[in-house]
Image (spheres, coloured by chain):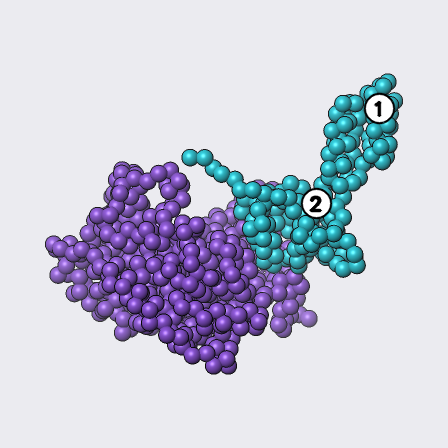
Amino acid sequence: MAEKSGSEILVEALVDCGVEIVFGYPGGAVLPIYDTLFGQKKIRHILCRHEQGAAHAAEGYARATGKPGVVLVTSGPGATNAVTGITDALMDSIPMVVITGQVATHLIGTDAFQEADTVGITRHCTKHNYLVKDPDKVGSTIQEAFFIATTGRPGPVVVDIPKDVQVASGTYRKSGPIAHKAYVPRDKPDTKLIEQAVEMLAEAERPIFYTGGGIINAGPGASQMLRELVRLTGAPVTSTLMGLGALPATAPEWLGMLGMHGTYEANMAMNRADLIVAIGARFDDRVTGRLDAFAPEAKKIHIDIDRSSINKNVSVDLPIVGDAGRAMEDMAKIWKAKQHKKRDLGDWWRRIEGWRATRCLDFPEDGDEIMPQRAIRALFEATKDRKPIISTEVGQHQMWAAQHFGFDAPNKWLTSGGLGTMGYGLPAAIGAQIAFPNALVIDIAGEASIQMNIQELGTASQYRLPVKIFILNNEYMGMVRQWQELTYSSRYSESYSDALPDFVALAEAYGWKGIRIEGKQELEPGIGEMLAHDGPVLVDCHVSKLANCFPMIPSGAAHTEMILQANEVSGTMDDEAKALV
Amino acid sequence: MKIRSPDTAPHTLSILVDNEPGILARIAGMFTARGYNIESLTVTDVSEDSSVSRITIVTTGSQNVIEQIITQTERMPPVYRVTDLTELGPHVERDLALVKVAGTGEHRIEALRLADVFRARVVDSTTESFVFEVTGASEKVDSFIELMREVGLVEVARTGVVAIGRGKEAS
């Protein structure tokens, strides 16, 4: 077999794995790979402005397409800068393969220039990682990395390749289906357990589906199966932050998001339900509130592809390990085969309607100030017909977007859920825009978060990506300020966004269009102007400075103890509650 | 505010893994990262072609924590399987210690006498010292070491627990 260099094998293996786009940043230890990329046309490299940006862009690409995101960075600082994005992908189960350069094998361990122990550093923030010391193993390792990243519960895989291995020659053969010796993901749920689940669902008087990012990861078919199950059972649905879009927000069964900033009806229904069917969700602390008061009356079915997610935080009655889509498909089949009829859930729905009547997402609105919730709703109304892809940073604006922007399809909502990474939204939007050049992609941001990866403005300019950024500018790290208000008697320690840049001028400096919105009457025209421009636009929308995000379950409280409006806020908390934040 | 710790019990886990570089760090690091205890850990290659290792870990935790430890370990790609030998039931556990004792006169004789009771073998001897090799369940090794303190214990080297299920099935 003809011998090739390690970097040629790498690029060939990437092509064989279906890779079209690589997000990266060059450096000393990956120069051979970049030289190989220079001479080929099958893979397009997107040059980001920071390795963290490259990793988030790959995440956004993966979340929007369902395909694995690929990152290429150099050794040392290249790898360590990517770590936040890698950890983010691990927490949110995003399939990603990160190729890192490493110093030559004979230099490893000598504190060489730009050396870092990348496999050591990333061991606990990856699903798996490799150091490849033999060019003959580059190809097979890459194929195995893609297999592990994309199957089972998806996640990031790092492949660290020393520079001499990139240069030395070896052989490569494209392999057939990967059969890993020890790693055998379990997709197919146990039919007997599915039958039990269907019986429990048929008998429940107060059922609720609690869905999560696992349904999005299981592909668009899984969202269809959820819709089918809801049609068959008539049961209400709530979802985690990561699961938004699996059921259309327009569906009558949709209760909105649950958890800390979820809706009153979703949290009350979880609390009063007699059956919770959790699908691809992991009973995160932001969802459950105080554990000993979580869903006290409910039997719980938990469907998850990761067995370790089951019984981790909440003990369940019926654990089912398997792919969310396959499990729901089997449930629908068995439901029909057993000729179950839709049960009369009238009493249950009447109670839910009662909770809905609190209109928990309403907000006070007077004066000329733009309420941030109003801005999100206006953005939604102006864009919903164009099926936009929305990314966010992290904080109040993220929760308001989750609450007030309606998602009707999966893969349209890119947000950092588990890790809560400020600076995620702009690069993620860039990744999604690369995948869908004609889509409307908007990063809903805060003025603090956007500055965490602001350098990526340059990436969008370089590739002529018409990304939009919509900043809800309240001159505070709003969620920090909100917690300080609730917990620390409004001592606003370091949460004021001082010395803000002129965002419009900054946008223009990068070749973007900049728009400033300062009063109510400017909101809709400003959004219209943003949408009318076919290039990248940054909108600096000045909103009410002290608005807080409600409803809210305070730290350490139960689902039934929601704060609905600002006047219910107490101002201090005991130490137990403070520690739970 | 005080930090509370839950009730715990020791479990012996037997973990079969691909014998790849960094596997021990991967598993030990996961225990640290998730706040699980390691009371003892042994690892060695157990297959003909050096491709599979067995790691034996003694850990403590509530039933829920033990279940989490098992599933968190099992989901790591290089892990074949995890067996909770404590739950499995009949199994053999052994711990080996090399115990150095120095002394003369009555202490020396007493050390030999105790060693005989524990079936410890003398594997090194000078006119002023012995090294004993003692094997058995951890409690037995603990008691032997405890007794040796009174007759001139100098130092101890110990393997930690290795364990295997009884009967013909693989654990």
Residue flagged by tag 2: what amino acid is it? Thr
Identified at 76% across, 36% down, the residue is B140
Residue A19: x and y in percent read 50, 69
Looking at the image, can residue A222 be seen? no
Q: CA distance from mark 1 to mark 2?
A: 32 Å
Where is residue A251 shown, x and y percent of the image?
32, 72
Residue B35 image offset from top left, x and y in percent: 54, 44
1 and 2 marks on the same chain:
yes
Residue B93 in view, yes or no: yes
Task: Find chain A in the image and tell me its colour.
Answer: purple
The local secondary structure at tag 2 comes to: strand
User: How many marks are shown on the rendered structure?
Assistant: 2
Q: Chain of mark 1?
A: B
Q: Which chain is cyan?
A: B
In the rendered image, the quadrant that contains the C terminus of chain A is: top left
The first of marks 1 and 2 along the sequence is 2
**Residue topped by disc 2:** B42
